[in-house]
Amino acid sequence: MAFSSLAAVSALFAARHVSAVLMVNELAVTPQMGWDNWNAFGCDVSADLLQGTAERIVEIGLKDAGYHYAVLDDCWSDGRYSNGSLKPNFEKFPNGMAAVADAMHDLGLGFGMYSDAGRYTCGQYEGSLGHEEIDAKTWASWGVDYLKYDNCYNDGQSGTAEISYNRYEVMSKALNATGRQILYSMCNWGQDHPWDWAYLIANSWRATGDIYDSFDRSDVRCPCENKDGIDCAFPGFHCSVMNIINKVVWFIHRSQPGGWNDMDGLEVGNGGMTDDEYKLHFTMWAALKSPLIMGNDIRTIDAKSYSILTNPAIIALNQDPAGASMQRRWRYYVSPTDAYGGGEIQMWSGNLAQGDYVMVLLNAANQDMHMNATLADIFVDNGGAQSAEAKGSWDLYDLWANRMPDSVANRILGANSTANATEYLYNATAKSYKEGIMANETLLMGKHIGSVKGLGTVSAVVPKHGVMAYRMRPKTASTYKRDEL
Ligand code: GAL
């Protein structure tokens, strides 16, 4: 590697060894990937929905792209048996939950379930507060691999980090005591700053209120957008993509291998945003190391949503072994009369494994924008203009330029088969993202579009509500060519 960032990167890896010791388990060394029914279906759940979705996840290559867990959200239960254990709703799940878990396992997927660290779930079904041990045992006996654990009706047991920690720790211990490997996905909406403590007990924690399928619509039910959400007392719901991005910015660096800030499930494919907005949503969730949990109807997925969710160069940001979130380097309002709600542009950058960097130009203004990112700003953490990184030259790879064409996506979706799509689809079952990244697999790199020389500027026209996303790779002096943008 060309620059002094070698020292920084080895320090990073050394630090990661320490956090590896703190990991609750080895289940989320990189953010978990999968599907959850909530965003598209809410309470309308059934064994048929899970079966149909899971089969398609496998058939159209989403499993091989890395989407491993099929997660059943709220509204699956029907009270408790007289022995105290949770009873499934047999109308929705005629053969019970173990049968569903078996079916998911037969397809090579992990099975996730949902409960709540309260008296009831948010949908007012049985909660698990006070029943942690028996519920964890029940899920383990059914073959559950993942628990999403919500926060409604918690009997007022929140308000300090310690109270929330203690409440969520009971389930962490109960899951561990089962002896089954169960990924623990906390869902307390960022209350009591879980990024300060949840990595000790969980694999991920919801950092913000519930997402809504909107790019930047203001909604009173998801407040604090103008304060950037610092210490917002109300996590809320109906939170737009930009609302969530602007709220996590302050603590997003607190993710680490084993424990991740969860920005909520994806809305790609649910119809409320434009293609550029969905690309932005997916890029930011990936590069901020949120779990990538699809939230659309996979059985009817369209070509454009499919080519977003399978873009290997973007997923590679999420599954990068360095496990570091990118950071926002600057933000400007485009129009003073439009202080939120769309009138802003941002630049984000961060380090990846292999000495690479990611840089994203984000345009949330209501018009296409010509945007510039100087190397001094991209490498501000390394010392800005004084740094060897800013003075060095970099190859640039556009992470969306090789997006699968609609014709290819439609062929895959029509045939329910991924035959002849290796040009666009990465198979992480055959070779993990980590191995692929270390081997510089072209699919994971994006398209080489040129380079930028020392103290130069990366410029691009970024579409309205869109992103340009780049992988930057250090160029050695000997290979430097004058083809900068
Ligand atoms: C919310 C949670 C959502 C969903 C819903 C189910 O609290 O944040 O993701 O699980 O409950 O009722």
Image: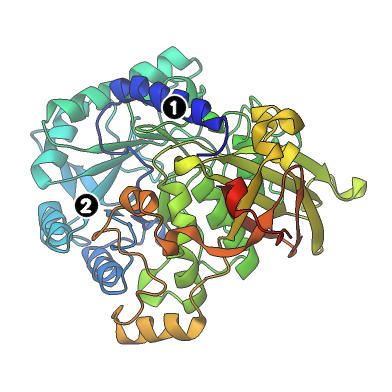
**Camera-side residue of 92 and 107:** 107
Mark 1: amino acid: Ser
How crowded pointer 1 is (Cα within 10 Å; few <14, some 14-19, many 20+) is rated as: few
Task: Write down the residue under mark 2.
Answer: 110
Q: Position of residue 349 (x, y in %)?
A: 62, 42
Task: Write down the residue under mark 1.
Answer: 10
Q: Residue drawn at (39%, 60%), measured in percent from left and top?
A: 441
Give the secondary structure at mark 2.
Answer: strand
295 left or right of 395? left
Is the CB of mark 2 within 8 Å of ligand 1?
no
Q: Is residue 215 visible?
A: no
Q: Tell me the CA gap for discs 1 and 2.
A: 33 Å
Mark 2: amino acid: Gly
Q: Position of residue 283 (x, y in %)?
A: 55, 54
Give the secondary structure at mark 1.
Answer: helix
Q: Position of residue 99 (x, y in %)?
A: 10, 58
Q: Position of residue 171 (x, y in %)?
A: 26, 27
Q: Is residue 306 above or below residue 205?
A: below
388 left or right of 165? right
Q: Residue drawn at (59%, 54%), measured in percent from left and top?
A: 479
Q: Is residue 190 visible?
A: yes
